[in-house]
Amino acid sequence: KSGNHYFMEVNPRVQVEHTVTEEISGVDIVQSQIKIASGKTLAELGLTQESIPEPQGVAMQCRVTTEDPSQDFRPDTGTIDVFRMPGGMGIRLDDGPGFPGAKITPHYDSLLVKITAKARTRQDAAAKLVRALKEFRVRGVTTNKSFMLHVLQNKEFLHGYVDTGFIAANPQLLAPLKEKDRAQKLLHYLGEVIVNGTPPALGATGAPPSSVDPIIPDIKPQVSNKQSLKSIFDEEGPEAFAKAVRQNGGLLVTDTTWRDAHQSLLATRLRTIDMLNVAAPTSVALRNAYSLECWGGATFDVSMRFLREDPWERLANLREAVPDIPLQMLLRGANAVGYTSYPDNVVFEFCRLAKETGMDVFRVFDSLNYIENMKLGIDAVGEAGGIIEGTVCYTGDVSDPNKGNYNLEYYLNYVRELNDLGIHVLAIKDMAGLLKPESAKMLVSAIRAEHFDLPIHVHTHDTAGTGVASMLAAAAAGADAVDAATDAMSGLTSQPSLGALVASTAGTDLDTGISLEEVSALNEYWEECRGLYAPFESGQKSGSADVYIHEMPGGQYTNLLYQSSVSAL
C-alpha cells in the first residue's frame, strides 16, 4: 500500500545439516516433511513446541567430498577404486554416489557421504568423527578427508573458539595426508605379475621357482664359556677384536651365504625373509665363526631396485636375529655401496649409520688398489668405531715371475701402505678366483713374516674349482680367517665349500670349531631354498679353469654369461 517492495525466500528443501538436528532431538525430519506434504499437521505429528524433547548430547557432521584442500578445494575427477565406509556406535552415514567403480565427473555435486557423530560432549563427538574418518577409505580420487581430520584435531575448534578467519590463520589445515595405499598397490602388483608375468627388468629368465618350502633346521643352542668375538669387540673395541683373532687357536671362517654367495650365483636376489627364517639355527651353528657377511656390495642397490626392500631394515633385523656373531659388509671405499664417488661427508655418515644399525666388520676395498679411495673409507669406518678390514685386491699370479707388475713386491708394498693407515685386519680379496694354492702360500707367508700381529683374512671365488685347496694353503701359511659359503651356495663363481673346509680341518691345528653336523643341517635348508631362486640361476654348470686366462671376477663373469644368453650370443 505504501509502495515498498519486500522479497521473501522460500526454501522448500531440508537443509543438509538436518542430520544433526535429528540426532539430538530424536525427530525424523525427513519423514515428518513427507507426512506434512501428504496433509498432516504439526499437531497431529506431535511436533508442537511443548512436545519436542530437550536436545540430548552433541552431534557433529562432516561432509566428505571429492575436493582437494591443498588445491583450493578444487574438485577432483576419476574412478573410485576402493570405497569402504566406517561404522560403529554413534556414527550415522548418509551416502551419495560413492561405490567401487563409480566415475566421478566434474558435472555433479562433489558430495560422497555425510558422516554424523553423536556423543555426550563436543570433544567426544569430534573424537568419534576422527575415528570414523580414519576408517573411511576412498581410493582413486582425492577427498577433503585430510582437511576435516586436521580441523577436528585442532584445539581451538574443539573448544569452539573459531571465526571466519579460522582457516586463513591455520594454513596447516590444508596440508594433504600421506596415505600408503598398501593394499591397492599390492593387489595391482599381484595382478600385474599374474597377467603379464615377472617384469623383465627383474632378470627372472630361468626355470620356474620350486614349490617346496625350505624346512628350517632345529639346532639346539650350546652352552659355552668362551667369550665370543662379538662380545670382545663390543666390550673392548676393534683392537681387542684383532688381537683375539690373532690369538685364536684354529682357522676362523666367514660365511658369505647372505651376501657374496648369492650375489655371485643368483644375481643378488636373496630376500631378507629367507635369511631371517634360518637366522636362529645359523647363530648356533656358526657361533665360532669370524663373521657373517650379509650387507654391502650390490645388496644395497638390489634390495631397493629389484626386491623392493629396505636395506637398512634388513641390517637391523639381521642384527636382532643374530646378536652374538660379528656382521660383515663390503664397502667400496669412496664409493660406499654405490657406483660413483660420493662426497666425504656422505661416506662418513653412511658408515656411522651402518655401525649404529648393527654392522661390525667393514671390508674396505678399491678394485684398482687406489690408496686415496681407501683412505676415505678407512677413516670413515674408524670414526664410526667399526672394525677396519683393509683390503688388497689380488690379480695375476705371484708364483709366476712372468705375470707382469702384480708380483709379490707389489702386494707387500700395498699392504705396508694399508697398515700405516691403521687398519685392524688385512683382507686379501681374490675377486676372480686366481689365487692358486702355491700363490696363496707365497703371498700369505710373506705378509705374515713382515706383519706378525696383523690378522689376515683371505677371500676367493671357486670359479676354477681350486678354492678349498687355496684356502687351506693360505691357512697353513698363516692366514687367520678365510671366506666360505654353505655347500649348496658354494662353488662356481661363489666361495669354496664351508662343509669341505670344516671337514678338512677337523682335528688339526686349523680346526674351525664348527660342527660338520650342524652346518650340514643348515645346508639342507639352503639346498631347498636355492630352488626358490631358480629363475635367477646364471646357467653355469661347472667350474672353469679358463678363469686363469680371462681373469674376470666372479660377479662380472655370471653377469656377462646372463647378458650373452639373453642376447642369443
Image: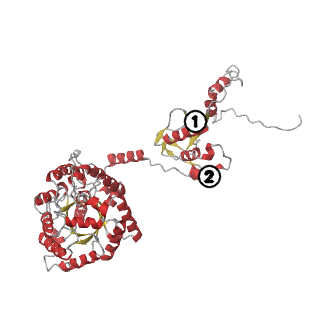
Q: Nearer the viewer, residue 354 or 546?
A: 354
Q: Nearer the viewer, residue 107 or 136?
A: 136
Residue at the (31%, 54%) spot, across then down = 318
Residue 116 circle label: 1
Q: Nearer the viewer, mark 1 or mark 2?
A: 2
Residue on which the image places disc 2? 170
Q: Quarter of the image containing the N terminus?
A: top right
- Disc 1 from disc 2: Cα separation: 24 Å
Disc 2, SS:
loop
**Residue 302, image x, y percentages:** 32, 59
Q: Is residue 300 above or below residue 524?
A: below
415 versus 133 height, above or below:
below
The mark that comes first in sequence, 1 or 2, is: 1
Please rate how many residues cluster around mark 2, counting C-alpha atoms within 10 Å: few if below 14, some from 14 to 19, many from 20. few
Q: Which amino acid type is shown beneath numbered disc 2?
A: Asn
Foreground pick, 206 / 234: 234
Under mark 1, the amino acid is Thr
User: Quadrant location of residue 493?
Assistant: bottom left
- Residue occupying the point 16% across, 78% down: 403
> Horizontally, is 569 left or right of 1 in the view?
left
Task: Determine if residue 568 is in view.
Answer: no
